[in-house]
């Protein structure tokens, strides 16, 4: 398999395009990564989604990015969240079958962070990582209960998803995630992608070190 192997799998609304990246060293898990909003240019090639993939690979995980329905070579129509959640769960099932049921990291950015959060409540990952997730979306209900550790990272200068709003939402949870708030960092982490990769990698390595 090449460093980035792209192909399609059967999804709930037709073909789903996936891109698989190999772990550095012996693979110790799988990372399924959800990209930002399809109606605003989000694809699996988004820089933050790519950065999450690289953080996972450098931490010893196989990365699996994918395009939601209607994006790239993925078929179907945008569904406002419910269908995209089904897409994410289909990719998780494929990745687990393809890579021998290794421990799963669920991750996502912005709209993809919101989808990954709801997927994590249904697919029993070892860890969830969200970057500036769209917590105000309500199409799938409020923030679901999670049984896995959750690492949350957000830029204080985010002009797309207000950090202050998400702070309030997280503070209201019975079990808030581990949080990292980066000053003077915007939504797309321009100029801070290396810092993002390093922080996420540290969180993954720490979690995987605690796995049996």
Image: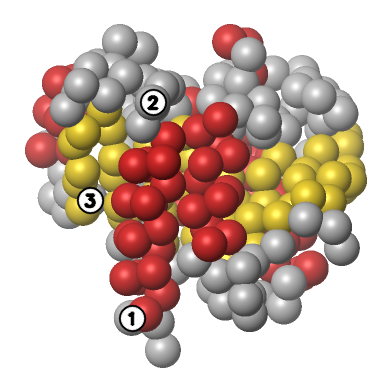
Tag of residue 177: 3
Give above or below for 44 relative to 94: above
For the N terminus, the image quarter is bottom right
Q: What secondary structure is found at the residue carrying circle 3?
A: loop
Q: How is the image coloured?
A: secondary structure
Q: Secondary structure at mark 1?
A: loop
What's the residue at 66%, 26% (across, down)? 43
Does residue 169 show up? no
Which numbered dot is residue 210?
1
Q: Which percent across, then down, holds residue 203?
A: 33, 60
Q: Is residue 188 left or right of residue 56?
A: left
Q: Residue at x 42, y 47 (%)?
A: 197
- The residue depicted at 86 percent of the width and 28 percent of the height is 73
Q: Residue shown at 21%/53% (left/top)?
A: 178
Helix, strand or loop status at disc 2: loop
Residue at mark 3 to residue at mark 1: CA–CA distance: 17 Å
Q: CA distance from mark 3 to mark 2?
A: 25 Å
Where is residue 211? Give x, y as percent: 40, 82
Inter-mark Cα distance, 1 to 2 = 31 Å
Q: Residues within 10 Å of mark 1 (few under 14, many from 20)?
A: few
According to the picture, the residue beneath numbered tag 2 turns out to be 191
Q: Earlier in the sequence, mark 3 or mark 2?
A: 3
Q: Earlier in the sequence, mark 3 or mark 1?
A: 3
Relative placement, left or right, of 68 versus 172 is: right
Crowd rating for badge 2 (residues with CA inside 10 Å; few <14, some 14–19, many 20+): few
């Amino acid at each position: 398999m090449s460093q980035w192997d792209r192909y399609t799998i059967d999804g709930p609304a037709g073909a789903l395009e996936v891109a698989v990246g190999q772990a550095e060293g012996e693979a110790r898990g799988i990372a399924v990564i959800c990209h930002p909003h399809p109606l605003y240019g989000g694809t699996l090639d988004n820089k933050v989604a790519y950065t999450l993939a690289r953080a996972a690979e450098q931490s010893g995980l196989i990365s699996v990015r994918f395009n939601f329905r209607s994006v790239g070579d993925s078929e179907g129509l945008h569904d406002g969240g419910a269908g995209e959640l089904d897409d994410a769960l289909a990719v998780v099932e494929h990745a687990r079958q393809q890579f021998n049921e290794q421990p799963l990291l669920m991750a996502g950015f912005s709209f993809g962070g919101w989808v990954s959060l709801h997927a994590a409540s249904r697919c029993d990952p070892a860890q969830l990582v969200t970057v500036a997730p769209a917590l105000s979306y309500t199409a799938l209900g409020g923030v679901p209960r999670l049984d896995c550790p959750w690492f949350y990272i957000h830029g204080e200068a985010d002009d797309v998803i207000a950090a202050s709003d998400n702070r309030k939402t997280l503070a209201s949870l019975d079990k808030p995630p581990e949080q990292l708030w980066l000053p003077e960092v915007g939504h797309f982490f321009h100029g801070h992608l290396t810092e993002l990769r390093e922080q996420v990698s540290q969180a993954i390595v720490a979690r995987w070190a605690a796995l049996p």
